[in-house]
Image: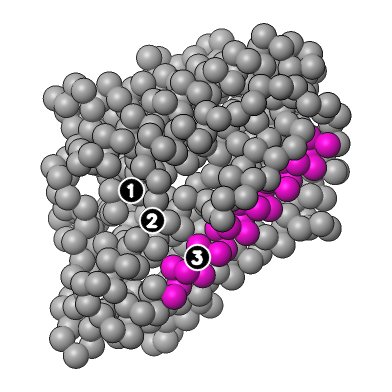
């Protein structure tokens, strides 16, 4: 993976020359970038599945580390697709299968009962790996074989969103285990022997491996569905045509920027100084998830996405569309996004230098807290100009998650 400084340099290398940008061309390019991002996510998920198969076949430190590295790499293109989630009904309906968070991990496997339980969720310590039968609503569910179909059935069952049985974060927990370090250094430390039936730790090593493989297979299947949404004739493209694609694009940028990333994923954890509020809490990969979420927002605005093979998908953009109406505002919003990426890049480079995001969250770590707050401030500032851009281009129906109007910004962000 490129280091933060190299990545940031590539991000900021964007020409501000305004291209001809009629609405249909902008929306078409937006959809092409979405398709490329989901295709890349599928490629990386397939590589992750190969690494998981190798781990299960030959459990050891090397294969476990390789599987973890493949998971981290798989997150890079996927996080950049999250800007397509909000405002696109078919995508938002699909997304919970692959990126639901937070989760009560004790549903899946063993945890420290003092740190993994949830009094509001009767299934928070159900431990699917250890139990071949689970009682749900008075009925026994046969879990003797852990299959993708079983995981689909268990995902968010009983209407409890924390019952996350599928997706990236279920796989993350299985690869790393609980992070019991609080705001001290260290991620989860699951041993490779948790998957070794000949030298088993943690119990139920065969079932744990079965769960990991099933979750990886299901992730691939779900990402294939995402790609199908964005190909020509796919439902997501039909949604753009039937609704207003520009409304969806601006809604996605604003909602991820403000309510989701600045608020739920960053400010809440900072207010509580709580590493349980980290997005990638088991792996200590949160610095990357924040960085690539921010990059995904910028990709949508600039109409440019760098694929995992280095090729570029680009075309008429929202920047162009706004610039044709108010060039100063278009540049101001781009400048805001550049400042946000610098702030998120500082978080990323600090983590890569050895101070993890959960350490930055710690009460008393003024420097770390300031880095996170700078990222939040950048996201809030760019969302203000996203709302101004919406007015300039004359759109109605854009609803930014977390705020009806940033003119009445909540004190939580200050």
In the rendered image, the quadrant that contains the C terminus is: top left
Q: Residue at x 53, y 77 (%)?
A: 149
Q: Is residue 311 visible?
A: yes
Tell me if residue 410 is in the magenta stretch. no
The residue that mark 3 highlights is 45
Tell me the residue that label 1 is attached to.
285
In this rendered view, identify the residue nearer to me: 331 or 239: 331
Q: Residues within 10 Å of mark 1 (few under 14, many from 20)?
A: many
Measuring from the top left, give residue 77's x and y in whole percent: 52, 51
Q: Find numbered disc 1 in the image and state the secondary structure of the residue it sits on.
A: loop
Residue 37 is covered by the magenta coloring: yes
Q: Earlier in the sequence, mark 3 or mark 2?
A: 3
- x%, y% of residue 221? 59, 70
**Tag 1–tag 2 contact (CB < 8 Å):** yes
Q: Nearer the viewer, residue 109 or 384?
A: 384
Of helix, strand and loop, which mostly describes the magenta segment? helix
Sequence-wise, the earlier of marks 1 and 2 is 2
Residue 44 place in picture, x, y as percent: 50, 62
SS of the residue at dot 3? helix
Task: Give the extent of the magenta segment.
Answer: 25-50
Disc assigned to residue 207: none
Residue 68 as seen in the image, left or right of residue 20: left
Under circle 2, the secondary element is helix
Q: Which residue is mark 2?
A: 72
Left or right of 88, for residue 335: left
For the residues marked 1 and 3, what is the alpha-carbon distance in whole angstroms?
A: 17 Å
Counting residues from the N terminus, which is met first, the one under dot 1 or under dot 3?
3
């Amino acid at each position: 993976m490129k280091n933060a400084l190299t990545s940031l340099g590539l991000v900021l290398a964007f020409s501000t020359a305004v291209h001809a940008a009629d609405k249909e061309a902008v929306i078409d390019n937006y959809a092409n970038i979405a398709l490329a991002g989901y295709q890349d996510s599928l490629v990386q998920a397939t590589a992750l599945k190969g690494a998981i198969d190798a781990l299960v076949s030959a459990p050891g430190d090397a294969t476990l580390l390789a599987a973890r590295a493949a998971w981290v790499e798989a997150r890079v293109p996927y996080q950049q697709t999250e800007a397509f989630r909000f405002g696109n009904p078919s995508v938002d309906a699909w997304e919970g299968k692959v990126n639901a968070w937070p989760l009560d991990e004790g549903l899946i496997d063993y945890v420290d009962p003092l740190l993994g339980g949830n009094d509001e969720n009767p299934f928070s310590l159900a431990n699917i790996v250890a139990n071949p039968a689970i009682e749900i609503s008075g009925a026994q569910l046969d879990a003797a074989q852990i299959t993708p179909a079983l995981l689909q059935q268990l995902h968010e069952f009983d209407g409890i969103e924390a019952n996350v049985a599928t997706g990236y974060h279920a796989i993350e927990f299985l690869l790393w285990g609980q992070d019991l370090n609080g705001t001290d250094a260290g991620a989860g430390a699951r041993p490779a022997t948790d998957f070794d039936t000949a030298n088993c730790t943690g119990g139920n090593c065969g079932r744990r491996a079965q769960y990991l493989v099933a979750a990886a297979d299901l992730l691939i299947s779900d990402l294939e569905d995402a790609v199908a949404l964005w190909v020509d004739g796919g439902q997501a493209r039909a949604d753009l045509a039937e609704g207003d694609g520009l409304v969806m694009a601006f809604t996605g940028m604003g909602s991820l920027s403000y309510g989701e990333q600045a608020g739920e994923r960053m400010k809440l954890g900072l207010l509580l100084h709580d590493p349980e509020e980290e997005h990638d809490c088991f792996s200590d990969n949160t610095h990357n998830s924040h960085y690539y979420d921010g990059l995904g927002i910028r990709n949508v605005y600039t109409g440019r996405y760098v694929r995992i093979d280095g090729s570029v998908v680009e075309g008429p953009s929202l920047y162009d569309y706004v610039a044709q109406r108010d060039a100063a505002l278009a540049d101001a919003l781009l400048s805001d996004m550049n400042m946000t990426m610098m702030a998120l890049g500082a978080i990323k480079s600090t983590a890569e230098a050895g101070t993890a995001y959960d350490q930055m969250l710690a009460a008393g770590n003024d420097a770390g807290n300031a880095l996170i707050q700078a990222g939040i401030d950048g996201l809030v500032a760019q969302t203000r100009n996203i709302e101004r851009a919406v007015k300039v281009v004359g759109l109605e129906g854009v609803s930014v998650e977390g705020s009806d109007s940033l003119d009445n910004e909540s004190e939580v962000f200050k």
